Amino acid sequence: MDAASHVPVVTIDGPSGSGKGTISREVARLLGWHLLDSGALYRLVALSGRGSGLAPDDVAGHAALARAMSVEFSGDEEGRERIRLDRVDVTREVRSEEAGQGASRVAAWPEVREALLARQRAFRVSPGLVADGRDMGTVIFPAADLKIYLTASAAERALRRHKQLKEKGSDANLAALSREIAERDQRDSTREVAPLKPAPDARIIDSTGMSIAQVVESVLSAGRARGLWS
Ligand code: C5P
């Protein structure tokens, strides 16, 4: 058993716009644990492929980039996230709908998923890890100490994404976003490798109509009930 297997992991999986990102960040902050934003890694592979001029269907090329790209997650003075890809700040591009669509395309290729496996597991560092994604509890950390599957109605998820994009200053059309979310859900849940689905031992939280604070509290109380923290 290696040292990393003693480090506790909480996985938070679910569809786009379910609030996973916000909840995972807040839970990690409150616990003082590390955060793995696995969706950002798939987004970065898509951006890196585009930046390198790869053909959109070049599977081996994207897998090679997934292994080689240099990625840095940090926060600026105000605590806002900063993401650098091969030393270039791509924080804004990473969150675009285009990068999200690109991510969902490259994420369907087993070669790319395999290439990101070790990179993701390397985030498991003391004192603990909150891992946000689609297959954190099913594939990447199947023995996680606590598995959450966070969902919300499709309409509420489109609204949340719309608000988030507007706050970041991007132009967003609600009808187009709803369509894109439905397409992405369909592709993510029907792909052959690591499809989006709750782990059999995941606790399912439907956050429709719940506030961020309520969802965070239900994750924290699930961890408390398991003796993961007090
Ligand atoms: O969560 P986010 O919207 O950043 O994820 C972008 C895309 O990356 C998802 O639609 C999904 O296709 C893919 N993804 C994945 N496995 C993960 C995280 C994200 O396939 N663990």
Image (cartoon, rainbow, N blue to C red):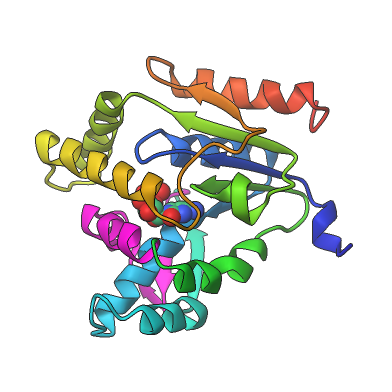
- Seen at 34% across and 61% down, the residue is 103
Q: Is residue 2 magenta?
A: no
Could you say where residue 230 lies in the image, as x and y percent from the top left? 80, 25
- Seen at 49% across and 31% down, the residue is 150
Determine if residue 149 is in view.
yes
Q: Is residue 94 magenta?
A: yes
Q: Is residue 13 left or right of residue 125?
A: left
Q: Quadrant of residue 167?
A: top left
- Say which of 102 and 127 sits in front: 102
The residue furthest top is 209
Q: Is residue 76 above or below residue 89?
A: above
Segment tinted magenta in the rendering: 79-107
The residue furthest right is 1
- Say which of 9 and 60 sits in front: 60
Q: Is residue 178 left or right of residue 78?
A: left
Q: Is residue 213 left or right of residue 106?
A: right
Q: Is residue 38 above or below residue 55?
A: above
Determine if residue 76 is in view.
no
State which quarter of the image contains the N terminus: bottom right
Could you say where residue 40 lies in the image, as x and y percent from the top left? 42, 58
